[in-house]
């Protein structure tokens, strides 16, 4: 039933879009009808290279996101477990964190040039924060009693991180990873637009510049779809990894 | 020959654990003072006393997580330097002491993993421990799915997995209902006697202390500078195995109960 309600709203929005396009209220050059956009989408997927571009974008997003997760969880674990590291590093992180990733683009261009590595760095930098901060928070919320259990069992620091710290931080870290994926998709598109890297970002930009509004909207629809699928995929992973929480 | 006799004398094993002249301050407050106590092999020592008398502190000194301000805490004749493999602890708050993301078997396994037991042996040892605490049917459940009494059994099984020489119990049954408590008391006595472990058992329940213990140590709150924290020691002298009905009806039980009760009522002076 909830499912039907959700679909109904989407259908209503599509109708509104169609009505606006048909009314001529917005010039057809800028707003295609949903039918025209869908046709462009199908056409691009079957005859054009839209499928390949989509894969390119997913690839950029995924690499940057994985790098962010790796650094975020690794560094987050170390900072979370050690109050010494927290004292040394937290102020720096607090300075870096509010920097918009887009403002770091010129810095990374200076460092890496207009290369795929620059885009990778921008994506990783931007999507690092949700994972890093969530992991640190997950470690901070370890039940003090479990610290004692670990000490009584004489667990090594590595064993404590692996067996108690990380599982305890996992719910937070997974939520952070989901947020990070959204950020990674945005930055992948920005990166493609900036560096003319092959992908949906560049395709959308070119479609806009040559007034191919149907192609532009086809690209935007595909991006929405990528976001939707990735989120559903991560939600499924989360349900599986945190299945113990359903038994409480 | 006198020399031989001398050797025999010095070779007599030191007590499993001992406190000599132990004092402990929390800030300006002296919690424990002039504490002398020995725990023998295969002995069950219960500690009672009013809230804030340092019962848990005494127990924590034996874990090595806490260091005395004065005096010595020894185990097997050696000063306690830190947690040891053969000293296990069972906390009162079982829900916080277990890993909620591990199953019952997984929680017991944690102690085996920490003790470097090879993977191939773990499953079999877990099965034995599960049988001992009566949780064989619940091996794959998560702690959150179990009742309080069952969760506490998981913690006991995890402690026994260490094969401890000394088992520290910090008001382990304080949060459980009376029926569950009595059941666990009997199981605990059976397990401890079977395995030859010594047990230091903290409780605020006098009946529980008498029922379980060989000896009861009563602590006083706020000892004066010249006073020992140990207000009284009761030798229980009740036969084993003990029985929830018969033991509690024995004149000796009632006598001890009266003595301990009036001690507590007088404010542990």
Image (spheres, coloured by chain):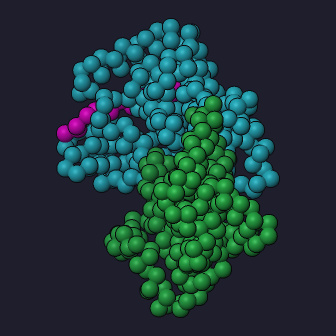
Chain colours: A green, B cyan
Above or below, comparing residue B130 to residue B256 in the picture: below
Residue at figure coordinates x 22%, y 37% from the top left: B222
For the C terminus of chain B, the quadrant is top left
Q: Is residue A197 left or right of residue A173?
A: right
In the picture, measured across the screen, residue B39 lies left or right of residue A35, that is left
Residue B109 visible in rendering: yes
Residue B42: image x %, image y %?
58, 36
Quarter of the image with the N terminus of chain B in it: bottom right
Residue A158 magenta? no
Percent position of residue B98, x then y: 55, 42
Work out whether residue B193 or residue A199 is closer to the camera in this orientation and state it: A199
In front of the other: B215 or B138: B138
Q: Up-down: is A110 above or below A145?
A: below
Report if residue A75 is visible in the image.
no
Q: Which residue is pictured at 51% across the width and 42% down the height?
A: B97
**Residue under the image location 79 percent in, 43 percent down:** B124
Give the magenta range.
B212-224
Image x and y of residue A110, in percent: 47, 91
**In this picture, is B46 found above or below B264?**
below
Q: Residue at x 36, y 69 (%)?
A: A98
Q: Is residue A52 above or below residue B268?
A: below
Residue A247 horizontal/vertical position (percent): 61, 35
Residue extending furthest toward the front = A24
Q: How many marks?
A: 0
Q: Quadrant of residue A8?
A: top right
Pick the front one: B210 or A244: A244
């Amino acid at each position: 039933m909830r499912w039907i309600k959700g679909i109904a709203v989407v259908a209503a929005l599509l109708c509104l879009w169609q009505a606006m396009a048909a009314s001529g209220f917005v010039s057809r050059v800028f707003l295609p009808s949903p039918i025209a956009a869908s046709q462009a989408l199908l056409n691009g997927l079957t005859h054009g290279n839209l499928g390949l571009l989509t894969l390119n974008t997913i690839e950029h997003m995924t690499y940057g996101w994985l790098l962010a997760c790796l650094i975020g969880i690794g560094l987050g674990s170390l900072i979370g477990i050690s109050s010494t590291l927290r004292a040394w590093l937290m102020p720096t992180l607090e300075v870096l964190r509010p920097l918009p990733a887009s403002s770091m683009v010129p810095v990374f261009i200076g460092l890496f040039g207009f290369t795929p590595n620059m885009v990778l760095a921008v994506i990783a930098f931007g999507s690092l924060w949700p994972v890093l901060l969530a992991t640190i928070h997950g470690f901070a919320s370890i039940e003090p009693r479990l610290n004692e259990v670990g000490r009584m069992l004489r667990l090594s620091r590595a064993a404590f991180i692996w067996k108690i710290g990380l599982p305890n931080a996992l719910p937070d870290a997974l939520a952070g990873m989901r947020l990070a994926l959204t950020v990674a998709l945005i930055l992948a598109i920005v990166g493609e637009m900036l560096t003319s890297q092959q992908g949906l970002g560049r395709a959308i930009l070119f479609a806009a510049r040559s007034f191919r509004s149907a192609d532009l909207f086809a690209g935007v629809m595909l991006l929405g779809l990528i976001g939707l699928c990735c989120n559903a995929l991560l939600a499924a992973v989360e349900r599986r990894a945190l299945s113990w929480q359903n038994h409480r | 020959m006198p020399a031989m006799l001398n050797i025999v004398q010095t070779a007599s094993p030191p007590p499993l654990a001992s406190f000599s002249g132990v004092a402990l301050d929390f800030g300006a407050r002296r919690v424990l003072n002039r504490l002398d106590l020995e725990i023998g092999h295969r002995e069950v020592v219960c500690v009672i006393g009013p809230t804030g008398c340092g019962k848990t502190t005494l127990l924590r000194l034996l874990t090595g997580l806490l260091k005395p301000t004065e005096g010595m805490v020894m185990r097997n004749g050696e000063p306690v330097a830190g947690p040891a493999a053969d000293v296990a602890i069972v906390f009162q708050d079982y829900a916080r002491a277990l890993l909620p993301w591990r199953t019952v078997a997984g929680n017991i396994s944690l102690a085996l993993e920490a003790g470097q037991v090879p993977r191939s042996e773990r499953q079999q040892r877990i099965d034995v421990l599960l049988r001992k605490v009566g949780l064989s049917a619940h091996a794959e459940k998560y702690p959150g799915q179990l009742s309080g009494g069952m969760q506490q059994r998981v913690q006991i099984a995890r402690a026994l997995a260490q094969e401890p020489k000394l088992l520290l119990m910090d008001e382990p049954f304080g949060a459980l209902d009376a029926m569950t408590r009595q059941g666990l008391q009997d199981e605990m006595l059976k397990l401890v006697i079977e395995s030859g472990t010594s047990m230091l058992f903290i409780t605020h329940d006098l009946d529980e202390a008498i029922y379980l213990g060989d000896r009861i140590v009563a602590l006083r709150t706020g000892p004066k500078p010249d006073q020992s924290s140990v207000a009284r020691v009761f030798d229980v002298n009740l036969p084993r195995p003990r029985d929830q009905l018969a033991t509690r009806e024995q004149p000796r039980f009632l006598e001890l109960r009266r003595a301990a009760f009036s001690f507590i009522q007088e404010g542990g002076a």
